[in-house]
Image: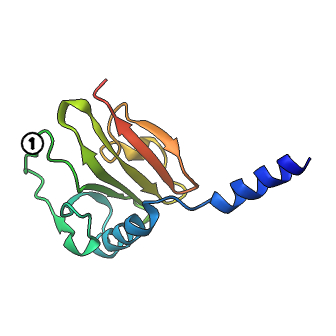
Amino acid sequence: MFRTVVLVVALASCHGSWSDRDRLDPVVAAVRARVTAPGRYRFQLDASLDPGSLVPVPSDAIMGRGDGRGRVRALVTATQKLAVSIEISDHGHAGEEGYLYRDPGITDDELEGTRLDSQHETRIDDHWVRWTYDLD
């Protein structure tokens, strides 16, 4: 019984805390401040993923393989719900990794173009998933 109580307390204390949240929540806030009209958006962050470095990327810009760190894809729905995908690493042909934030109520169908096809996701909490895309 004591082990069960310790395990429950340990899990409860970890809920909602993960190492990248402190640097990624401000990125979502920066995107939210810049996108007001429904649609899809692309941004780029510098290599340190500093939210102050967020700049729009033209729709015709071509990104090279391995150049994805800091890539941000965003969606604003007609009901003003926001989804933001932030790429934290790009290993070229070895794959990509990142996090996807979404407001409640955004459907999987709406995420097309914000979420990579066939990305693998691990749920963190009600808003965040960690994703990997291994080019399979």
Q: Residue at x 77, y 50 (%)?
A: 7
Q: Position of residue 57 (x, y in %)?
A: 13, 59
Q: Is residue 122 above or below residue 17?
A: above
Q: Residue at x 35, y 43 (%)?
A: 115
Type of amino acid under label 1: Gly
- Count of labels in the image: 1
Residue indicated by mark 1:
64
Q: Position of residue 95 (x, y in %)?
A: 27, 34
Q: Is residue 1 left or right of residue 105?
A: right
Q: How is the image coloured?
A: rainbow
Question: For the residue carrying disc 1, how many other residues have a C-alpha within 10 Å: few (<14), some (14-19), or many (20+)?
Answer: few
Task: State which quadrant residue 135 falls in.
Answer: top left
Q: Is residue 12 left or right of residue 35?
A: right
Q: Is residue 105 above or below residue 67?
A: below
Q: Position of residue 30 (x, y in %)?
A: 32, 73
Q: Is residue 89 left or right of residue 79?
A: left
Front-most of 111 and 18?
18
